[in-house]
C-alpha cells in the first residue's frame, strides 16, 4: 500500500468508503425499512391490493380504465380521468402528456398518407383539441353539454390562423364548416390537411360557452395512474350509473360520499373520490 | 373549506413546522460536525476506510477527497447499470445503454438526479437501492460537508485546516440523513408508499383487462430523495406516482422533508461562527425569496392564464386530483427552490408564468433554501458578493464575519456565480443551433425554447426536474447535460473550498465603525436585492424569449 502513488491510495480509500457506505445505506437501511414496513404495514407496503373472491383486481392507489376492449366507456361504471400512461393507466409506462398551455394547433391527418411505419397518418392532436374532444365525449355520455371556452361544437380547438387576406380554422379539417364564417372581415376557411399554416398569426377564439364538464374530466393527471376523480365529476356521472344499474340516484350519491376522502386534517389536498373502490361497491350491490 | 384558504393553510403549516424544527435540528447538526467523539460504529468504519479521524485537511486535500469519492462513485454506478442483468434483483431489466448509464451515473453523483430514463422500465431493484439510493445519501452528505468546510473557513483563524472530509461524510450520512430517513420511510409506508421486493405482477382488473402492478423498495428511496434534495424518482412519474406519494398528507410530509435540512443549515452556520444572529440573517434571506416564489407560483397556477388552462377552467393538466392545484404549485416551487427536482405534477403543462417561476427558482442558483449543503454555500457566496457590492457603493471595507473580502476571495465568488449561467446559456444556445437537437422539443414556439432552457438550467444547477416533454435520451443530450451537471457541481465546489481555505488563513479584523453589519434586516434586503438583480440581468433575455413571450401573449 505505502509504495503506491498517493493519488492511487486516495482513490482506493474513496472506493473503500463508497463500498462501506453502500452496505450501510444501500443494503442494511432498505432491508431494515422493508422488515419494519412488512411487519407493521403489510398491506400498504405491498401496494394496497384489493381482492375480490380471493383474487387481486388491482390496487386502491392505482387507477384503472373502465372501458371495453375498443376503448369505449362501460356505462355501468364510473369513469376515471384521461391518462397519458401508455395506452391508459399502464403502471409500466407512467407519466403525463407534457403538452404546454399554448399547444393549440393540430396537425391534421392527411387522408391516404402513411407514417414512417406504414400506418395511416394519424396527425397530431394539440392539447386544446384533446381537451375539447374529451369534453364533448363526456358531455355525450352523461347527457349534458360538452361545450367549453375555446372549443368548437365538433370538439376541436377553436383556433384561427390569420393571414393578410384570409383566416383558416386550422383544427377543422375540410369539408367541415368553420365555427365562425368571418373574422374581422376576413373569410374563414376550413383547414386543408397537409397545408403549412405556420406563417399565420395564431388566434384562439374563446366564444361564449360555459363548461359543465369538470376540469379533471378533460385533463390527464401527472402520473397517468390517478386513482381519484373530483366530487363534481362523480356527481356528474351519478345519474347515468344509477340509470344503467337500475338504482335510485340517491343510493349512488350515498356511495360516492362513502368513497370520498376529504382533505387530510381539513386543509391538505382536495376532496377526491376513489373510482375503483366506488365501482367495486356498486358491483357488490 | 374554500380551496384557496386550504392552500394557504397548507403553506402556513409548512412554514410553522420548519420554524419549529429549525433550532433543534440546526443545533444537532452543529454538534454532529463539531463534536470530538466518534461513535463505536464510526470507529469501525474509519478502520475499514483506513483514515485517521483525528487528522484534519487543508482545502486542497479536502477537495481531492470530494473529487476522488465522486469519481469512484460515478464508475461504480456506471458499472452497476451496465451489468445489471448479470447481478441479482434485476427483475428482468436489460443493461442500461452506455450514454444513458453515463448520464445517470453523473446525474446521481452530482445530486442532480436528472432522469433520462424511465424508472419502471429501465432500472432493476439492485441498481435503484444499492446504486441510485446510495448516491442519494452520499451526494447529499458531500454537499453538506462542503458547506461545513466553508463555514469553518469563516469561523477559524490563522489556519489552513478545514476538517476531515471522510469524517464529515460519514457523520452526515450516519448521524443526520439515516435516522431521519428511517423514520420518514416508515411514515410514508403508513400513508401507502410501497416497500417490497415483489416482481411486477399482472392482475385482471374489474373490466377484465390486464394491469401490471409494479413493486420495489420505494419508500426507503422516496424519503432520501426528498430529504437529501435529490429528486430521482423510483418511477418515471416521480412523486406524482401514487406508490411514491399516495395521499395529500404524504405530499405535505415530502415537501417538509425537502425543505427540512436546507432551512436548518443556517442555524448550524450561526452556531459554528459563534453568532446565531448571522444565521438568522441568512435564513431570513432564504425565507423571503422562498415565500415570494411560492406565493407567485400559487397565484399564477390558480389564475390559470393561457388558452388551454382557460378552456379547461383550471391548470389541471399534469396534476393529480388528490393534491389539487395549490399543493401541486407549492411542491413545484419547493422542489426548484431547493436542488431537489422531484415533481408531483408536470411543469411542462403548468401555465406559462407558473412554469417560468420553477425555472426562475433554479436560476436563483438554488439558494432559497437550496440543496442540503449547496444552498448554504451558494447563499454564503452571494453574501460575500453583497458585502463587496455594498463596499463599493458606500466606500466601506468589504468584510464578512471579520474576514476581509479581498481580490482573491471575490474572484472565487465571482467565478462561482458565473459558472452556472455560462453552462445554461451556452448549452441552450448549442441545442437551439442545431435542427437535430431542436427536434427533441415536444412543443413548438416559445414553449419549445422553454423546454430546452429548462433542461440546461436544471442540469447545470443540479436540480434534475424537467419540462418533461423534451426528448433527452439521445446521445447528444445525455452527453451535453451530463457535462453541464458535472461542471455545474464540481467547479463551484472547488471554488468554495478554495475560498474556505483562503478565509481560514486570515486572522479576523475587529469590527469597526466602517464595518457593514451583516445580521440586520438592511443586510437581508441587500442580499435579496443583489440575488434577484444578478439573476434577472443574466437570464431576462432568455426568459423573455421563452415563458414571458408565451405568458404575455
Image: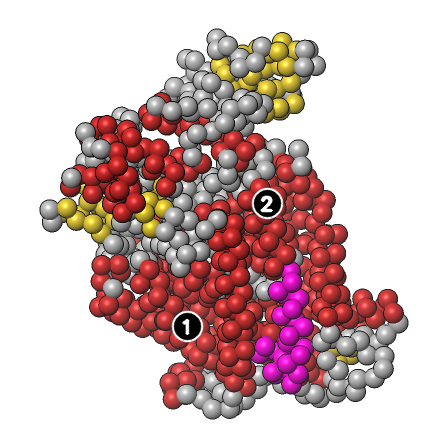
* Residue nearest the viewer, comparing B199 with B382: B382
Placement of B553 over or under B354, stated as above or below: above
Q: Which residues are magenta?
A: B267-289
State the quadrant of the N terminus of chain A.
bottom left
Q: Residue at x 50, y 77 (%)?
A: B25
Q: Residue at x 26, y 59 (%)?
A: A44
Secondary-structure class at tag 1:
helix
Q: Let me know if residue B375 appears in the view.
A: yes
Q: Quadrant of residue A266?
A: bottom left
* Residue nearest the viewer, comparing A152 with B32: A152
Measured in 3D between alpha carbons, the distance from the residue under mark 2 to the one under mark 1, in whole angstroms, is: 34 Å
Q: The disc numbered 1 marks a residue on which chain?
A: B
Question: In the image, which is nearer the foreground, mark 2 or mark 1?
Answer: 2
Hey, which residue is sitting farthest left in the picture? A53
Colour mapping used in the image? secondary structure
Circle 1 residue: B180
Q: Position of residue B519 (x, y in %)?
A: 71, 76
Indicate which disc, 2 or 1, sits on the residue closer to the N terminus.
1
Placement of A250 over or under A260, stated as above or below: above
State the quadrant of the C terminus of chain A.
top left
Q: Main secondary structure of the magenta part?
A: helix
Say which mark, if any, is on residue B300.
Answer: 2
Placement of B543 over or under B31, stated as above or below: above
Q: Position of residue A19 (x, y in %)?
A: 39, 73
Magenta segment: does it hold B286? yes
Say which mark, if any, is on residue B24.
Answer: none
Q: Residue at x 51, y 40 (%)?
A: B315
Q: Is residue B518 left or right of residue B375?
A: right
Secondary-structure class at tag 2:
helix
Q: Is residue A18 left or right of residue A195?
A: left
Q: Position of residue A64 (x, y in %)?
A: 28, 40
Amino acid at each position: 500500500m505505502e509504495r503506491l502513488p498517493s493519488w492511487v491510495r486516495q482513490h482506493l480509500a474513496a472506493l473503500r468508503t463508497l463500498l462501506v457506505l453502500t452496505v450501510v445505506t444501500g443494503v442494511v437501511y432498505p432491508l431494515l425499512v422493508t422488515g419494519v414496513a412488512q411487519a407493521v404495514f403489510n398491506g400498504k407496503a405491498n401496494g394496497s391490493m384489493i381482492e375480490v373472491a380471493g383474487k387481486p383486481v388491482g390496487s386502491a392507489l392505482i387507477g384503472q380504465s373502465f372501458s371495453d376492449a375498443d376503448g369505449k366507456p362501460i356505462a355501468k361504471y364510473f369513469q376515471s380521468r384521461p391518462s397519458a400512461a401508455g395506452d391508459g393507466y399502464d403502471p409500466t409506462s407512467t407519466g403525463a402528456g407534457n403538452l404546454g398551455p399554448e399547444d393549440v394547433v393540430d396537425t391534421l391527418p392527411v387522408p391516404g398518407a402513411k407514417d414512417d411505419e406504414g400506418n395511416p397518418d394519424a396527425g397530431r392532436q394539440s392539447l386544446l383539441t384533446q381537451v375539447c374532444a374529451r369534453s364533448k365525449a363526456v358531455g355525450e355520455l352523461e347527457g349534458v353539454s360538452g361545450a367549453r371556452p375555446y372549443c368548437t361544437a365538433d370538439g376541436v380547438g377553436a383556433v384561427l390562423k390569420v393571414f393578410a387576406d384570409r383566416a383558416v380554422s386550422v383544427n377543422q379539417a375540410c369539408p367541415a364548416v368553420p365555427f365562425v364564417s368571418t373574422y374581422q372581415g376576413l373569410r374563414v376557411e376550413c383547414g386543408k390537411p397537409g397545408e403549412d399554416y405556420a406563417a399565420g398569426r395564431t388566434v384562439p377564439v374563446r366564444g361564449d360557452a360555459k363548461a359543465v364538464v369538470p376540469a379533471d374530466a378533460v385533463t390527464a393527471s401527472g402520473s397517468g395512474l390517478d386513482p381519484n376523480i373530483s366530487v363534481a365529476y362523480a356527481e356528474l356521472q351519478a345519474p347515468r350509473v344509477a340509470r344503467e344499474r337500475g338504482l335510485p340516484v340517491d343510493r349512488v350519491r350515498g356511495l360516492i360520499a362513502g368513497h370520498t376522502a376529504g382533505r387530510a386534517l381539513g386543509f391538505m389536498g382536495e376532496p377526491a373520490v376513489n373510482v375503483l373502490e366506488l365501482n367495486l361497491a356498486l358491483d357488490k350491490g | 373549506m374554500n380551496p384557496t384558504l386550504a392552500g394557504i393553510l397548507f403553506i402556513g403549516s409548512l412554514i410553522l413546522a420548519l420554524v419549529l424544527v429549525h433550532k433543534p435540528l440546526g443545533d444537532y447538526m452543529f454538534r454532529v460536525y463539531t463534536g470530538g467523539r466518534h461513535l463505536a460504529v464510526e470507529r469501525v468504519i474509519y478502520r475499514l476506510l483506513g483514515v485517521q479521524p483525528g487528522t484534519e485537511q487543508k482545502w486542497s486535500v479536502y477537495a481531492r477527497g470530494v473529487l476522488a469519492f465522486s469519481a469512484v462513485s460515478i464508475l461504480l454506478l456506471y458499472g452497476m447499470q451496465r451489468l445489471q442483468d448479470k447481478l441479482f434483483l434485476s427483475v428482468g431489466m436489460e443493461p442500461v445503454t452506455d450514454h444513458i448509464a453515463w448520464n445517470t451515473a453523473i446525474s446521481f453523483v452530482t445530486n442532480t438526479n436528472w432522469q433520462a430514463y424511465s424508472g419502471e422500465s429501465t432500472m432493476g431493484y439492485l441498481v435503484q437501492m444499492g446504486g441510485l439510493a446510495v448516491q442519494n445519501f452520499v451526494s447529499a452528505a458531500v454537499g453538506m460537508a462542503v458547506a461545513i468546510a466553508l463555514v469553518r473557513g469563516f469561523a477559524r483563524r490563522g489556519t489552513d485546516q478545514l476538517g476531515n472530509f471522510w469524517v464529515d461524510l460519514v457523520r452526515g450520512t450516519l448521524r443526520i440523513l439515516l435516522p431521519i430517513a428511517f423514520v420518514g420511510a416508515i411514515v410514508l409506508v403508513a400513508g401507502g408508499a410501497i416497500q417490497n421486493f415483489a416482481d411486477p405482477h399482472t392482475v385482471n382488473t374489474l373490466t377484465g383487462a390486464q394491469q401490471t402492478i409494479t413493486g420495489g423498495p420505494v419508500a426507503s428511496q422516496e424519503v432520501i430523495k426528498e430529504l437529501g434534495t435529490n429528486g430521482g424518482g423510483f418511477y418515471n412519474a416521480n412523486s406524482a406516482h401514487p406508490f411514491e406519494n399516495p395521499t395529500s398528507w404524504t405530499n405535505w410530509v415530502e415537501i417538509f422533508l425537502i425543505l427540512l435540512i436546507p432551512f436548518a443549515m443556517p442555524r448550524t452556520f450561526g452556531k459554528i461562527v459563534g453568532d446565531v444572529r448571522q444565521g438568522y440573517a441568512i435564513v431570513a434571506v432564504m425565507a423571503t425569496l422562498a415565500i415570494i416564489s411560492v406565493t407567485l407560483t400559487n397565484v399564477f397556477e390558480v389564475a390559470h392564464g393561457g388558452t388551454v388552462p382557460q378552456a379547461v377552467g383550471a391548470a389541471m393538466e399534469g396534476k393529480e386530483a388528490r393534491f389539487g392545484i395549490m399543493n401541486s404549485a407549492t411542491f413545484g416551487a419547493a422542489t426548484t427552490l431547493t436542488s431537489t427536482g422531484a415533481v408531483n405534477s408536470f411543469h411542462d403543462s403548468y401555465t406559462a408564468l407558473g412554469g417560468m417561476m420553477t425555472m426562475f427558482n433554479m436560476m436563483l442558483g438554488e439558494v432559497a433554501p437550496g440543496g442540503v449543503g449547496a444552498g448554504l454555500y451558494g447563499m454564503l457566496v452571494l453574501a460575500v458578493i453583497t458585502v463587496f457590492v455594498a463596499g463599493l457603493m458606500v466606500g466601506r471595507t468589504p468584510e464578512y464575519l471579520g474576514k476581509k473580502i479581498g481580490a482573491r476571495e471575490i474572484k472565487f465568488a465571482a467565478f462561482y456565480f458565473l459558472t452556472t449561467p455560462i453552462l445554461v446559456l451556452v448549452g441552450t444556445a448549442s441545442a437551439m443551433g442545431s435542427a437535430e437537437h431542436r427536434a427533441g422539443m415536444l412543443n413548438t414556439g416559445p414553449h419549445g425554447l422553454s423546454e430546452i432552457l429548462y433542461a440546461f438550467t436544471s442540469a447545470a444547477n443540479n436540480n434534475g426536474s424537467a419540462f418533461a416533454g423534451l426528448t433527452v435520451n439521445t446521445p447528444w443530450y445525455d452527453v451535453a447535460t451530463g457535462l453541464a451537471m458535472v461542471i455545474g457541481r464540481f467547479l463551484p465546489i472547488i471554488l468554495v473550498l478554495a475560498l474556505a481555505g483562503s478565509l481560514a488563513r486570515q486572522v479576523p479584523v475587529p469590527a469597526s465603525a466602517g464595518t457593514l453589519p451583516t445580521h440586520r434586516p438592511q443586510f437581508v434586503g441587500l442580499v435579496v436585492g443583489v440575488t434577484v438583480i444578478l439573476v434577472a440581468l443574466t437570464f431576462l433575455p432568455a426568459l423573455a424569449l421563452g415563458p414571458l413571450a408565451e405568458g404575455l401573449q
